[in-house]
Image (cartoon, rainbow, N blue to C red):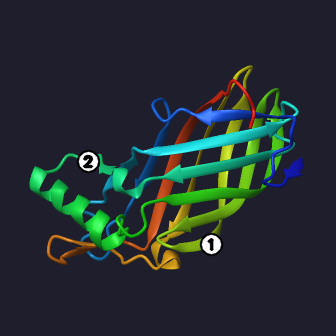
Amino acid sequence: MATSSAAASSSSTRYVIDPRTSQFTVQAFANGLIAAIAHSPKIAIRDWTGVIDVASGDFDAASIHIRVKPASLEVLDEMPDSDRRELHRIMNHEVLESAKFPEIAYESTRVITDKMKDDLYRVNVRGRLTLHGVSNEQDVGAQASLGVDSIRAHGSFTLLQTDYDIRIASIAGGTLKLMDELKFSFYVLARKAATAA
């Protein structure tokens, strides 16, 4: 088991996340008595970037930096175009206020790794998430594998919207309200950069 700070050493290798082959989604959940039949939207994050700095070819010292454009969120579920437009409007204007807060940022402060076998690791990342103008500690769990020139990782984490002063969305004229908790899931492919920063 090893821990690291967010600062990457001069001998670190930088890996750049490839958003075209990676996936980053948000699952919201319907609330109340109609939750069993109501819509719980799944949302894709389309415009995001990230880098992972790894020292000495291992996860013994690593740092992670992620940037997300909240205006790029896109509902994946099948629904009428009018409902989709309304949900996008609510997300951008009433919930995330994307024009006022155009970027979401995550910076790791500590990485704890547990080597499972060969180049496969169980990873717990502690970091600071800045969302909707509020910064909070946020842990992210994942499994990661370190290849010759790439890192692959998958995992999930949850957060409460109210922790970030986010208004809980109501849909369909207020007849459907979503739960406070959101679940984020990701699959990441990061490729070794030509040079380390």
On screen, residue 106 versus residue 195, left or right, reads left
The reply to whether residue 23 is visible in this rendering is yes
Q: Position of residue 76 (x, y in %)?
A: 29, 46
Q: Position of residue 65 (x, y in %)?
A: 64, 50
Q: Which numbered marker is on residue 136? A: 1
Q: Position of residue 52 (x, y in %)?
A: 69, 41
Q: Position of residue 126 (x, y in %)?
A: 72, 60
Residue under the point 34% across and 71% down: 95
Callout 2 secondary element: loop
Residue farthest along the top direction in this orientation = 148
In the picture of the structure, the residue carrying the numbered disc 2 is 77
Give the Cα separation between the discs numbered 1 and 2.
Answer: 30 Å
Is the C terminus in the top left, top right, bottom left or bottom right quadrant? top right
Where 88 falls versus 81 (above or below)?
Answer: below
Mark 1 residue crowding within 10 angstroms, few (<14) / some (14–19) / many (20+): few
Front: mark 1 or 2: 1
| Quarter of image, res 83 | bottom left
Q: Nearer the viewer, residue 111 or 89?
A: 89
Mark 2 residue crowding within 10 angstroms, few (<14) / some (14–19) / many (20+): few
On screen, residue 15 versus residue 68, left or right, reads right
On screen, residue 82 versus residue 32, left or right, reads left
